[in-house]
Image: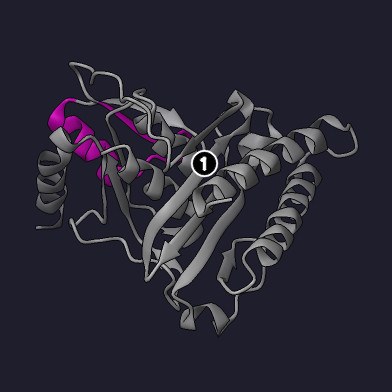
């Protein structure tokens, strides 16, 4: 398999495993999220170490080490992005599998198992036409004040949604124009979504317009902007005004 084929296959299979864990009837509440996270993580980690033994690996659910920092090629995975939504049997959760090369998200796949969809960097689909009134996806439980302020400034409709991957893929799928996040994330939250978004011709950066760089010693990433190119300058300008 190519790297892209591997990423898509792993995301798809991990998603199907998660659905099986959930429908098994063996878990409920927080224990379901824990079981799903750990089961999917075991599959992804073992598969990647077997298929790409020389590459580095960073997963939300595995203990991080310094070994990956010396690697040019590093896989970054999130077995369940949106554990709460997964446990609540919603569709706005995802599985992320990305390959970053020299800090850049070159390959990515995002599975949306609740929708039986896998979006991938090597098979971009045509993005539907933009809505006349921009739509901005934000956290359904705690929308960031900066995103709310920018939405008001540009006249955007706010759409509450669960996981980071689901929000990013909403832009890829033409269900929204803008995903602006300022509440802090980690590398595994955005590596695969950014790879997929870039492959679909979307803009992806920090909210100051600088590049997103992965495989860092500190995996925390403060902010993220994924949007249609026609909205990039306006959104970045509005964010800059908030910081003045």
Q: In the picture provided, is 80 more to the left or to the right than 71? A: right
Frontmost residue, 219 versus 157:
219
Q: Residue at x 66, y 73 (%)?
A: 63
Extreme residue in the right direction: 26
Q: Residue at x 36, y 23 (%)?
A: 175
Q: Identify the magenta region.
A: 135-155
Frontmost residue, 5 versus 112:
5
Q: Is residue 107 above or below residue 15?
A: below
Badge 1 density bin: few <14, some 14–19, many ≥20, Cα 10 Å: many
* Residue 9 in view: yes
Q: Position of residue 203 (x, y in %)?
A: 24, 44
For residue 33, what is the image quadrant? top right
Dot 1 falls on a residue whose secondary structure is strand
Q: In the picture provided, is 32 more to the left or to the right than 181? A: right
**Which residue is the site of mark 1?**
110
Q: In the picture provided, is 197 more to the left or to the right than 112? A: left
Query: Does the magenta-highlighted stretch encompass residue 100?
Result: no
Q: Residue at x 56, y 49 (%)?
A: 7
Q: Position of residue 4 (x, y in %)?
A: 50, 48
How are the residues colored? Answer: one colour
Q: Residue at x 82, y 29 (%)?
A: 23
């Amino acid at each position: 398999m190519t790297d892209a084929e591997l990423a898509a296959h792993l995301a798809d299979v991990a998603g199907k495993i998660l659905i099986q864990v959930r429908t098994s009837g063996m878990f409920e509440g927080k224990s379901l999220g824990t079981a799903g996270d750990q089961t999917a993580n075991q599959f992804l980690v073992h598969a990647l170490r077997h298929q790409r033994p020389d590459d580095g690996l960073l997963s939300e659910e595995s203990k991080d080490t310094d070994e990956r920092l010396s690697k040019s090629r590093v896989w970054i995975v999130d077995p369940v992005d949106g554990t709460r939504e997964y446990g609540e049997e919603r569709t706005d959760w995802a599985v992320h599998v990305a390959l970053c090369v020299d800090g850049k998200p070159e390959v990515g796949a995002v599975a949306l198992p609740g929708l039986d969809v896998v979006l991938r960097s090597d098979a971009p689909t045509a993005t539907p036409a933009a809505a006349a009134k921009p739509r901005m996806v934000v956290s359904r439980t705690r929308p960031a004040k900066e995103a709310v302020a920018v939405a008001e400034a540009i006249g955007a409709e706010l759409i509450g949604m669960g996981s980071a991957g689901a929000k990013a893929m909403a832009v890829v799928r033409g269900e929204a124009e803008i995903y602006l996040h300022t509440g802090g994330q980690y590398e595994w939250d955005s590596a695969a979504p950014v790879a997929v978004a870039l492959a679909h011709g979307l803009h992806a950066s920090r909210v100051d317009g600088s590049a997103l760089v992965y495989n860092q010693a500190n995996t925390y990433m403060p902010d993220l902007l994924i949007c249609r190119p026609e909205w990039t300058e306006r959104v970045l300008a509005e964010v800059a005004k908030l910081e003045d």
